[in-house]
Amino acid sequence: AQRVTQPEKLLSVFKGAPVELKCNYSYSGSPELFWYVQYSRQRLQLLLRHISRESIKGFTADLNKGETSFHLKKPFAQEEDSAMYYCAGETSGSRLTFGEGTQLTVNP
Amino acid sequence: NAGVTQTPKFQVLKTGQSMTLQCAQDMNHEYMSWYRQDPGMGLRLIHYSVGAGITDQGEVPNGYNVSRSTTEDFPLRLLSAAPSQTSVYFCASSYRRGGTKLFFGSGTQLSVL
């Protein structure tokens, strides 16, 4: 079955520390992968997508086909990064599937 | 530009009651969808539509109905509410199905007693 897994429900780091939110996928084809973020009292919004190979708000994510992972990374976490993060994936013809979500807390 | 508008923001129902969650978008998006968000389970797709007059089931469709009579509107109907339907519901739309950015509404927090 096509699915996306985020093994950590909660992640807590200190300001200035590196942060990595894990995402693993199982897809039979070549998936398109996304990270969505929901800040407190805001709407869920797209953070980045792997085909764009972009850095948004200092976050990057690389697709590792060998490990079937799409981990989200930031070298120096900021307090405003505290939010719920969802990894999501799809293949051509399939529907977008979200992971369970990781609540990131960046402590001062 | 309003984007995706959901109403109501909060709702409390008694078991067995029915209600409709409203969703409207003003971006002329073909694709619209409904998700429910439950702790530890992420977002799960309930129903979706790829255009006016076309709807299909998602991952957890039981207990819900949808229709798409116009491009703009995609209401979600709970036929006979159950406590298991207590959740936060999100409507989302995109230009087309697949490979594009989803725009989300602000959510409806529903409690079924």
Image (cartoon, coloured by chain):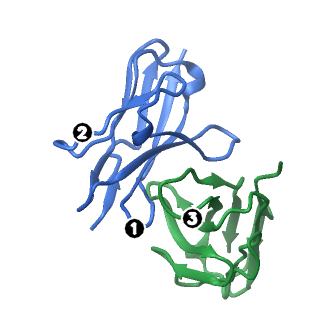
Chain colours: A blue, B green
Q: CA distance from mark 2 to mark 3?
A: 29 Å
- The circle drawn on residue A64 is 2
Q: Upstream in the sequence, badge 1 or badge 2?
A: 2
Q: Name the quarter where the C terminus of chain A is drawn.
A: top right
> Residue A29, located in which quarter of the rendered image?
bottom left
Which residue is the extreme one toward the top?
A: A16
| Chain to which the residue tagged by mark 1 belongs | A
| In the depicted structure, whether residue A8 falls above or below residue B48 | above
Q: Is residue B78 left or right of residue B57?
A: right
Badge 3 local density, few (<14 within 10 Å), some, or many (20+)? many
Query: Could you tell me residue B65's position as x and y percent?
Result: 63, 84
Q: Which mark is residue B81?
A: none
Would you place residue A38 above or below residue B101 in this image?
Answer: above
Across and down, in percent, residue B107 comes to 69, 57
What is the distance, in whole Å, between disc 1 and disc 2 at their CAs?
Answer: 21 Å
Amino acid carrying label 3: it is: Arg
Q: Residues within 10 Å of mark 2 (few under 14, many from 20)?
A: few
Q: Residue furthest right?
A: B1
Residue B13 on image: x %, y % = 74, 76
Query: Left or right: where does residue A41 sit relative to residue A108?
Result: right
Residue that numbered label 1 is attached to? A94
In what element is the residue under mark 2?
loop
For badge 1, the amino acid type reads Ser
